Image (spheres, rainbow, N blue to C red):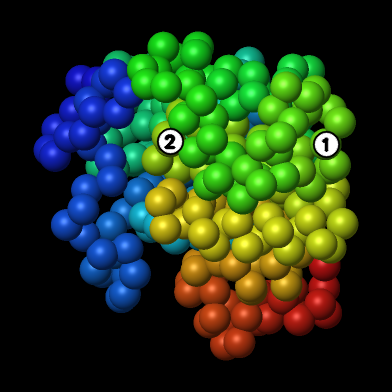
């Protein structure tokens, strides 16, 4: 991965390979042509064996934006999300085609180590999945595994503060993480993901199992984290996508005439305000307005 991504401005973080991430000379917001691209997807398709899951995805995902993937169940949102950190590699029958660039480098290039990819592109899953360890050890697990240098207490505290969990956890760091509420566990998983200082955080329906108060805290946290990380989120909650995301992609399910094959496809991708107030495609309007689902 070093050879594939070491061109240009570099920054060394905790003795990891030097790679081109987080350049400071480009603005994250503004017109699309002026935004820095974190990912570039060009005609990306995913299949499992002979069954297509996603087809013809072409879109750019921008730095320090929250990008939402919305659409009905089975349209390939999570499959597409997992392409971004090569989690689909763990499924033997999965095949990814097309081109997927990360900061201009081929994420699926022959010299790219998917384990290194996942160090830079973290993931938070639908259901909170803390380790059966103390709160402290949950956060310290990644940095210890990677051999990160520095004071571990400081690394743990920084991650918990960034995840807005320090005040609730500082007096119980030795307690088992299973004793936390569901919302606290999900924020702990976010803290664990950012403890190794990634570039991107992927979130697969992170609030679907949470109550409204915990959901609000996660959404508020996402808005804070995007100042430091690029975030891509899968959500079924239209209000959530409208509240927190900068860009939204609407996917739908297509099928053959005999209905034997079904796959997901991006219908429309644009600024979130436009998607929810003035979409270009009638299918998008029908979905975000609740007429179809």
Residue furthest to the bottom in view is: 278
Residue 209 position (above or below residue 67): above
Q: CA separation, marks 1 and 2?
A: 25 Å
Task: Find disc 2 in the rendering and name its residue.
Answer: 198
Residue positioned 80% across, 23% down in the render:
176
Location of residue 99 by image quarter = top left
Q: Which numbered dot is residue 245?
A: none
Q: Residue furthest front?
A: 171
Residue 213 in view (yes/no)? yes
Residue 60 percent across, percent down from the top left: 39, 56
> Which sits in the foreground, 149 or 26?
149
- Front residue of this view, candidates 45 and 231: 231
Relative to 110, is 253 above or below? below
Label 1, on which residue?
180
Residue at figure coordinates x 82%, y 62% from the top left: 213
Point out residue 255 in the picture as x, y percentages from the top left corner. 73, 52
Q: Given the current orientation, which residue lies at the most extreme left position? A: 8
The number of callouts visible is 2
Classify 10 Å Cα crowding around label 1: few (below 14), some (14-19), many (20 and above): some
> In the picture, residue 132 is in which quadrant?
top right
Which residue is at 87% across, 57% downward? 211
Question: Is any atom of residue 84 visible in this view?
Answer: no
Instruction: Give the mark nearer the N terminus: 1 vs 2.
Output: 1
Q: Kindly report which numbered mark, 1 or 2, lies closer to the viewer in this rendering.
A: 1
Q: Residue, x 30% and y 75% (percent of image)? A: 31
- The N terminus sits in image quarter: top left
């Amino acid at each position: 991965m070093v050879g594939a991504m070491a061109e240009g401005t570099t920054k060394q973080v905790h003795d990891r390979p030097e790679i081109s991430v987080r350049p400071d000379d480009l603005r994250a917001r503004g017109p699309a042509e002026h935004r820095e691209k974190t990912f570039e997807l060009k005609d990306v398709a995913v299949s499992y064996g002979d069954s297509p899951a996603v087809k013809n995805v072409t879109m750019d995902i921008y730095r320090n934006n929250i990008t939402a993937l919305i659409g009905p169940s089975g349209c390939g949102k999570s499959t597409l999300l997992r392409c971004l950190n090569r989690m689909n590699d763990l499924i033997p029958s999965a095949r990814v085609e097309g081109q997927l660039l990360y900061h201009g480098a081929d994420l699926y290039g022959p010299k790219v180590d998917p384990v290194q990819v996942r160090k830079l592109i973290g993931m938070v899953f639908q259901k909170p999945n803390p380790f059966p360890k103390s709160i402290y050890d949950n956060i310290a697990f990644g940095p210890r595994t990677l051999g990160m240098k520095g004071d571990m207490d400081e690394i743990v505290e920084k991650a918990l503060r960034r995840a807005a969990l320090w005040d609730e956890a500082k007096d119980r760091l030795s307690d088992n993480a299973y004793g936390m509420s569901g919302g606290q566990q999900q924020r702990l998983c976010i803290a664990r993901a950012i403890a190794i200082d990634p570039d991107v955080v992927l979130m697969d329906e992170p609030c679907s199992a949470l109550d409204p108060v915990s959901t609000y805290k996660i959404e508020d946290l996402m808005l804070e984290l995007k100042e430091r990380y690029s975030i891509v989120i899968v959500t079924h909650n239209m209000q959530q996508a409208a509240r927190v995301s900068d860009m939204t992609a609407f996917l739908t399910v297509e099928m053959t005439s005999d209905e034997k094959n079904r796959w997901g496809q991006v219908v429309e991708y644009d600024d979130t305000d436009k998607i929810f107030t003035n979409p270009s495609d009638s299918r998008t309007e029908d979905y975000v307005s609740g007429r179809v689902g």
